[in-house]
Image: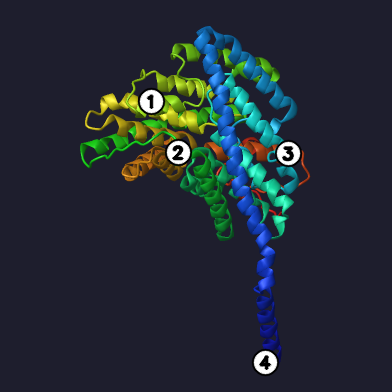
Amino acid sequence: MTISLSRRRIAARLKKAKNAAPWRIIERWPQRLSIWLGGIVVALCAILFAWSTEYAFSLFERAIAWHPAAAFAITPVGLVLVAWLTLRFVPGAQGSGIPQTIAALSLSPTQRKSVLSLRIAFAKILLTSIGLASGASMGREGPSVQVGASLMLRIGKLFRMEGTLNERSITLAGGAAGIAAAFNTPLAGVVFAIEELSRSYEARTSGTVLTAVILAGVTSLSLVGNSPYFGHAEMVLELGKGWFAVGLIGLSGGILGGLFSQMLIVASQHGLPGRIGRLARQQPILFAAICGLILAAIGLASGHTTYGTGYQEGRALLEGEALPWTFFPLKILATLFSYLSGIPGGLFSPSLSAGAGMGSAMAHLLPDTPAKACILLGMAAYFTGVVQSPITAAVIVMEMTDNRELMVPLMATSFVAFGVSRLVCPHPLYKALAMKFLAHKSSGSTQPVRTDLSDEVAPPAAQDQEPRLPSTKE
């Protein structure tokens, strides 16, 4: 018996030594190099994506500068074109791209191709650019997550990384690198991967995500420069009366953001009510045209401030320029109709812009709080209310404005908004939308679908069932 145990121990030690041998370490270098290459490629694509969308929106700005009513022709036609191309050729590219990436974490490799592929990545860039050239209120950051995950998966297959890293880890790394390069915020990329893409953070994934995000961030900084997205916003919020703004703005952002998310979830799971809902289901192209006309009307009423990502308006507010208080409700409406039209596009930038408008409007009610501080708190509060990721919201606003002195108030505001938003909208937006993809894939498919990363929301068609289905290994 003793001899048998000794032989087993010797065999185990020999196996361990073999796995730790230098040649085994050398064998892992191709996988490591592929992660490095993937982070750089994702950053380059994110930068090209940014340039493409900026140029596309500049074309729309020239058109409405020539004649304000041009939007009533350009926006409906543009949304019809994008909606038709999406439905006809790339149905997996609609919407933000973050729900698809979250759903991909729970899909089998074969099913994953329907939401993450080079074809969808290319289409996402092209269609989002056309949407912004049409004046839609949407961002490129969410689509950058899907593009990044698609590119990283493809590079992983080229280098045969499946033996060392599973596709779930590669997907997380690509999505995190995409958001880091899109906003030029590396720390936010890591936090986003932990808090939003995957609530269960595995130790073996951490090095992969960190490596991809760091290299994506370094590449972005090298080519774009160390310039914050919304510029430098130096501001300190003193303890005392100024902190009343934390509670009030957090409360407002949680309510408004939660209502926005709840409307999107209800529309996604159950459809719009009445004749409008039937029209959207039976004639989605016509519905996209109607949404385009509504966007043009909102843009005209807002003085052309609700078109596009909202970056210019957010930065203008931080630089002291004044916008009417109606900007933020109109921006919310424009973003809502842009998303309901079914075209590809994200919610990050429009939500930050609407939050900045909300904070600017509430600054008049808070004379003891600097207006710029109210704007920053408003950005974090409304963004948290929409996506229900408080740490990501605080870190993104901090990095995008290069303001570390306001980090504690930003965190406090984000957590107030998070708590209020969960009361209004019990399920996180992206998780709920991801479950729609999972429910669609599980119905009519013989392959098992994992839902272990989406256990907070039950499938839309089976709310009375257990929210967590049995997981299966890929």
Q: Classify 170 as above or below 29.
A: above
Tell me which residue sits at (65%, 35%) in the image. 461
Q: CA distance from mark 3 to mark 4?
A: 55 Å
Out of 428 and 72, give the one closest to the viewer: 72
Out of 425 and 25, give the one closest to the viewer: 25
Q: CA distance from mark 1 to mark 2?
A: 31 Å
Identify the secondary structure beneath mark 3.
loop
From the viewer's perspective, is 320 left or right of 58? Answer: left
Indicate the position of residue 209 as horizontal and vertical percent values.
Answer: 56, 52
Identify the secondary structure beneath mark 4.
helix
Q: CA distance from mark 3 to mark 1?
A: 48 Å
Indicate the position of residue 42 as horizontal and vertical percent values.
Answer: 61, 43
Residue 295 has which mark?
none
What amino acid type is highlighted by mark number 2?
A: Arg
Q: Classify 369 as above or below 467.
A: above
Q: Indicate which disc, 3 or 4, sits on the residue closer to the N terminus.
A: 4
Residue 2 has which mark?
4
Mark nearest the camera among 3 and 1 is: 1
| Other-residue count near label 2 (Cα within 10 Å), few / some / many at <14 / 14–19 / ≥20 | some
Asked whether residue 346 appears in the rendered view, the answer is yes
Please say if the residues under marks 3 and 1 sit with CB atoms less than 8 Å apart. Answer: no
Name the residue that disc number 1 marks. Answer: 316
Q: Indicate which disc, 3 or 1, sits on the residue closer to the N terminus.
A: 1
Location of residue 342 (image quadrant): top right
